Image: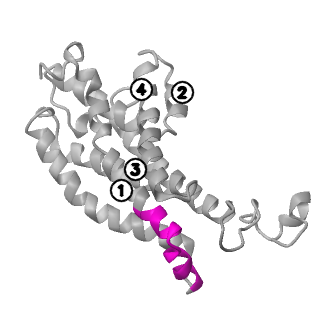
Amino acid sequence: SQFMAPQNGGRYMPLFTVLGYLYSLSRLLSLVVEEKEGRQREAMLIMGLRPMAFNVSYVVVGALMHVVTSLLITLITKLSFFSMADPTLLFALVFFFSNTIIAFGLLISTLFSKARVAAIVGPMLMVAFSVPFFIIPQHTDVGVLYVLSVLPCLAFSKAIGSITTLGGGGQTVGWSMLLDGEYSLGVALLIMFLDFVLYLALAWYLDNVLPSEIGTKKHPLFFLPDALRPACLCCTKTI
């Protein structure tokens, strides 16, 4: 608990935790973009596989793997830094964040065609997105924090920061504190889930509209219902 106290470096515990996911994100990006680069994905799409099914397969497999890794992380942190925290709450936070990282990886994989570049740039983006937690003033308006929570690391960093502060003060952190505070642990869990859904939706959208070497991409407004398309000048052509 002395290490976890903010004055003894506990403020940086969220950063240490986020950095632990850099390798898994790099590997995910490498695998996804390698399939795109090697044309395996296009072959599966030609055979009838839907792009969303491709992404969902990574989410399902990743989620199953993260059940095990989240249990291990929970066990290690419970026996070391977060001894005052409820292990089931720790597991929920770690598992939600792990799945958010999968969705984030699928999102940014749509921007790359080279696996090596994706594997390098992706973790760099994740580190960059973890910086706002450390540079925003301590008493920043909660509305600003909600807006910044569209970044993949802020909600998890806030949750870990809260556990660090409360645990360092000798309090037992459990589900009874789920709704305590403006940016509570419950809010952090909800935002991580919303980020997960948002990233998957954006990955699906960009996968359909961004140009690539193979295949015909859809119109940027392809998702509009047929009845609304004639109302938009840019949708007068067949989408």
Q: Which residue position is annotated with label 4?
A: 133
Image quadrant of residue 175? top left
* Image point (52%, 39%), residue name: 150
Q: Give the mark, 2 or 4, whose residue is nearer the N terminus.
A: 4
Q: Nearer the viewer, residue 116 or 84?
A: 116
Name the outermost residue toward the bottom.
47
At label 2, counting other C-alpha atoms closer than 10 Å, the crowd grade (few under 14, some 14-19, many 20 or more) is few
Q: Which mark is in front, 2 or 4?
A: 4
Residue 162 position in % (x across, y down):
29, 27
- Amino acid type, mark 1: Arg
In the picture, the disc for residue 101 is 3
At label 1, counting other C-alpha atoms closer than 10 Å, the crowd grade (few under 14, some 14-19, many 20 or more) is some
Q: Which residue position is annotated with label 2?
A: 143
Q: Which residue position is annotated with label 1?
A: 27
Q: Give the mark, 1 or 2, whose residue is nearer the N terminus.
A: 1
Asked if labels 4 and 1 touch by Cβ distance under 8 angstroms, the answer is no
- Amino acid type, mark 3: Ile
Q: Nearer the viewer, residue 114 or 46?
A: 114
